[in-house]
Amino acid sequence: MTNLERVREKMREKGISAILMTDMANIAWLTGFSGSFGFVLLSQDQARFLTDSRYTIQAGEQVKEMPVAWYQSPTTSDDFIASQIHEMGFKQLCFESAHVTYATFERLRDKLSGVELKGSEDIFSALRMIKTPDEIARVRSACGLADACFAHVSRLIMPGVTEWDVSMEIEFFIRRSGHALAFDVIAVSGENSARPHGHATEKKLEVGDFLTLDFGAKVDGYCSDITRTVVIGEATDRHREIYGQVLKAQLACLDAMKPGARAADIDALARAVFDEIGLAKYFGHGLGHGLGSLVHDAGRMNATSQDILEPGQIWTVEPGVYLPGFGGVRIEDDAVITETGIEILTHAPKGLMVLPG
């Protein structure tokens, strides 16, 4: 079943006769369009992708399952959308209420006399969580590039190299491979590594630093997200204790992931492992998130999550502890839920590495 067929099935289930899609993440997932501006009008028997003249050629190349219509100045997007809705004959139209401002709703309402506009609940997130074999293959390719990048940059890590040097080398490797970054590279060392989303600086790597690298590639529209932490020069017993407990937590969580498991329970397992040596209070973020066309795709693995693991979902699993004044450790892999457990998609080494080795 295609994603378009899955959406139409969900629309029938929810009693939605027609919908205006405005969220670009949902639109990219449904149509394959990778530009920054577009809309989809969709019913059980009609579908139309709308954009402006900047993307006429690109939309024609990428959008395969529905006709493409476009406009150019001086026509406005509101006028164009309204004309397409009237042309398609919709008398009732739902919209993505979480992504349409009240001002936009008012403008459309004023131009759509005779059309009933209704806000719709999110019908796309649950669908996006279950990846097709093609989507999984794209994420797997992105993970392979991230693994290769880590192997490359590991050879450059040594005292005296700056965080900025490492960050730029990661970015250059991915872009030189013909692909994009999934998000801004995180490369933080020493005390800076206690900042989960810290930014690279001109700080030089020093013996005794933790160095945390968090990065990902975007390949054919799908993302990877990997984190590895290494020690520079020499590891103390404290380095080994902290790193070992983070790795123990991650391995326990990966082992517990299978269809039917509750995301919140997996998150709690990591915290229980950290609590064995008093580290749970230093783990402030959720254990992971969904991964796909967005690096933070639908799905959350945290204490309040209601998500249940199902085959086809792809999750990051990224426990971490962050000690102010000392440093932090995070280890992150990407894993797809299978019928019996998981397939781990990232394969860079994650035993404690002391670099240069």
Image (cartoon, helix red, strand yellow):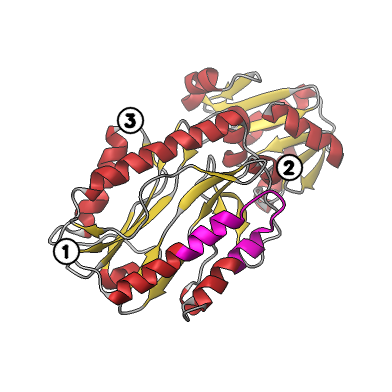
Q: Nearer the viewer, mark 2 or mark 1?
A: 1
- Residue 91: which quarter of the image? top right
Q: Secondary structure at mark 1?
A: loop
In the image shown, does 96 or 243 lie closer to the viewer? 243
- Give the residue type at disc 1: Lys
Q: Are the residues flagged by discs 2 and 3 in contact, CB closer than 8 Å?
A: no
Disc nearer the start of the sequence (2/3): 2
Disc nearer the start of the sequence (1/3): 3
Quarter of the image containing the N terminus?
Answer: top right
> Is residue 288 in the magenta section?
no
In the image shown, does 245 or 17 lie closer to the viewer? 245
- Magenta-colored span: 248-268
In the image shown, does 127 or 150 lie closer to the viewer? 150
What secondary structure predominates along the stretch shown in magenta?
helix
Question: Is residue 96 in view from this perspective?
Answer: yes
What residue is rendered at 25% in x and 43% in y? 152
Name the residue beneath numbered marker 1. 204
Residue 237 in percent (x, y) is at 29, 75
Name the residue beneath numbered marker 2. 95
Q: Secondary structure at mark 2?
A: strand
- Give the residue type at disc 2: Phe
In whole angstroms, how far apart are the C-alphas of marks 2 and 1?
51 Å
340 horizontally vs 325: left or right: right
- Name the residue at the left extreme: 160
The image's mark for residue 178 is 3
> Is residue 263 in the magenta section?
yes
What residue is rendered at 55% in x and 71% in y? 271
- Give the residue type at disc 3: Gly
